[in-house]
């Protein structure tokens, strides 16, 4: 088989798989939406309050009943797939409930369709968001502030300098002259884009350089780059697992893991945060009912700044013969003596984790994600993963910046030690002031838990009066009574900045409570 034929075959195979998973996603999303309350990702309301925008009418729910309960079956003929909606328990299906109604009125000029079906500003989703934003704007919207300059230990907002705890430039690589010059040189030689999928004509030498550098850094057989961290989880999980499989994920898993799980169409089970004993119970009950089983966790969890019990979970993975994905978005470059992540932190062999996932936007001053693991895994993803095959390759600047950052980290591991020292100082000072830092430990993510969302936003603005910029996390991103300010530490922060910050937040919390 020649190269052209092999490439065509790979793309054709990936096309079939992409169509199948996309159709699965449509059905899964529709079913999931039926149980949503329409609440936006931003809310100042207690979850039991009911003054939000009206939900869909009964008439609208009835019209969509066949769609939201549709199940999809596949009959494959040659290289094509035929998908047929199946009746639900009530005997209705997509055709009879929605399609037939529209066809029946197709000859009428007065088609009766609720305006919220075709005017976006009238949809319940937007109406709910608008209500929440109205409440936030009364306090002063802290989101989408425009920053100028480089995000380091400080940032510029409206021509004023603030100490910054709102970006995750953990190792100070963004803005480092060596990293900046590497990105400039790559653009000068290769342009601003590779302008194609790597399967076609987008492959460049720097792509494999970075992949091999990451694989050596993590001691894995190979590695594959993706253009976005979020997309890495979505396309990898969604592509590797299916309806005959089971995915167990931590209750505080990132949205990208959850979206990948929905895309897969697998059976999904959530286990309590970092509770490996509950995970063990689920595996003992359900493992033998499924083919492939995936356990999905994170190295460091970004809301609470705590670390996964990886040794216990690896033991379960081996005992129950499952796959294990570890999302190292916030732990690569941070944990371990030399920044090699949670595996180095616990002394876990790289082969004990099947999918080492990470992002390049935090410790490595760039944008994108990667999957590191076995040669077979990477080769399969390289030729079939929709988010890789059908996406442009990483830009020259982003790839060069990440590569320079990784090499600089290997030459200067003291950045990791300095980050750890600054993080420990902040945490100890906060605890000395009796601030509620939750379960954060030994990481550069330190929450200060306030209570309700309104108080968190008020405190955010008060901190800005002290020249300190830190973002709030509010319900439903976190539980209603655990809204917080979340501090991201950098190795660039000084001890003086940290002392000033902790004193200021302790003072302002005391004022709020008085």
Image: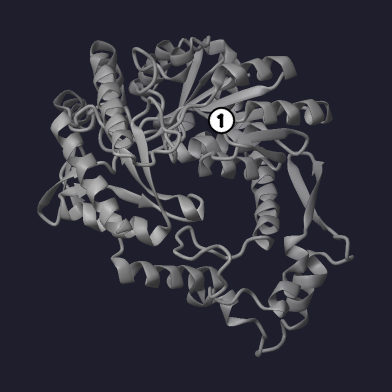
**Residue 176 located left or right of residue 363:** left
In what quadrant of the picture does the N terminus appear? top right
**Residue 425 located left or right of residue 6:** left
Query: Considering depth in this image, is 226 or 264 the residue closer to the camera?
Result: 264
Residue 102 quadrant = bottom right
Residue 90 quadrant = bottom right
Query: Considering depth in this image, is 439 or 262 the residue closer to the camera?
Result: 439
Residue 308 position, x and y percent, is 52, 26
Residue 236 position, x and y percent, is 57, 33
Residue 270 quadrant = top right
| Residue 369 visible here | yes
Residue placed at 55% from the left, 20% from the top?
Answer: 310
Residue placed at 41% from the left, 58% from the top?
Answer: 453
Query: Considering depth in this image, is 367 or 492 the residue closer to the camera?
Result: 492
For mark 1, what is the residue?
A: 297
Residue 244 position, x and y percent, is 78, 35
Residue 495 position, x and y percent, is 17, 29
**Residue 374 located left or right of residue 507:** right
61, above or below 239, in the image = below
Residue placed at 28% from the left, 33% from the top?
Answer: 489
Count the numbered circles shown. 1
Circle 1 sits in a helix, a strand or a loop, which is it? strand
| Residue 366 visible here | no
In what quadrant of the picture does the C terminus appear? bottom left
Categorize mark 1 by other alpha carbons within 10 Å: few (<14), some (14-19), many (20+): many
């Amino acid at each position: 088989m020649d190269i052209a034929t092999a490439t065509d075959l790979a793309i054709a195979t990936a096309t079939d798989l992409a169509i199948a998973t996309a159709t699965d996603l449509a059905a899964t999303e529709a079913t999931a939406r039926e149980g949503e309350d329409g609440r936006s990702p931003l809310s100042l309301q207690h979850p039991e309050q009911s003054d939000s925008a009206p939900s869909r009418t009964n008439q609208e729910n009835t019209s969509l009943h066949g769609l939201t309960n549709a199940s999809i079956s596949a009959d494959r003929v040659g290289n094509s797939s035929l998908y047929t909606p199946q009746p639900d328990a009530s005997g209705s299906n997509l055709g009879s409930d929605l399609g037939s109604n529209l066809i029946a009125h197709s000859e009428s000029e007065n088609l009766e369709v609720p305006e919220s079906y075709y005017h976006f500003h009238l949809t319940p989703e937007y109406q709910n968001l608008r209500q929440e934003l109205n409440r936030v704007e009364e306090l002063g919207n802290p989101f989408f502030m425009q920053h100028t300059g480089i995000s380091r230990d400080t940032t510029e907002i409206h021509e004023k300098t603030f100490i910054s705890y709102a970006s995750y430039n953990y190792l100070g690589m963004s803005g480092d002259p060596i990293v900046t010059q590497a990105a400039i040189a790559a653009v000068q030689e290769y342009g601003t884009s590779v302008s194609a999928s790597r399967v076609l004509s987008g492959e460049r030498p720097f792509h494999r350089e970075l992949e091999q550098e990451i694989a050596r850094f993590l001691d894995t057989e190979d590695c594959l780059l993706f253009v976005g961290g979020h997309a890495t989880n979505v396309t990898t999980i969604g592509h590797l697992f299916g309806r005959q499989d089971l995915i167990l994920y931590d209750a505080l898993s990132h949205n990208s893991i959850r979206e990948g799980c929905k895309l897969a169409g697998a059976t999904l089970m959530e286990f309590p945060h970092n509770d490996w004993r509950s995970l063990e119970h689920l595996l003992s009950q359900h493992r033998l009912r499924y083919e492939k089983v995936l356990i999905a966790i994170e190295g460091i969890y970004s809301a609470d700044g705590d670390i996964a019990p990886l040794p216990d979970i690896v033991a379960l993975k081996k005992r129950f013969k499952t796959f294990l994905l570890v999302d190292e978005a916030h732990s690569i470059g941070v944990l371990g003596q030399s920044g090699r992540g949670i595996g180095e932190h616990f002394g876990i062999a790289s082969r004990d984790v099947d999918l080492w996932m990470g992002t390049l936007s935090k410790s490595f001053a760039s944008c994108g994600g990667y999957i590191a693991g076995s040669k077979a895994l990477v080769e399969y993803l390289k030729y079939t993963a929709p988010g890789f095959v059908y996406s442009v390759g990483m830009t020259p600047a982003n790839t060069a910046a990440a590569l320079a950052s990784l090499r600089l980290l290997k030459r200067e591991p003291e950045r990791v030690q300095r980050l750890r020292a600054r993080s420990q100082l902040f945490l100890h000072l906060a605890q000395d002031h009796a601030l509620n830092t939750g379960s954060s430990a030994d990481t550069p993510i330190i929450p200060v838990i306030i209570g309700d969302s309104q108080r968190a936003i008020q405190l955010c603005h008060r901190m800005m009066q002290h020249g300190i910029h830190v973002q709030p996390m509010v319900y439903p991103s976190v539980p209603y009574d655990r809204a917080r300010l979340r501090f991201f530490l950098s190795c660039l922060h000084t001890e003086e900045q940290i002392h000033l910050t902790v004193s200021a937040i302790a003072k302002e919390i005391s004022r709020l409570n008085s």
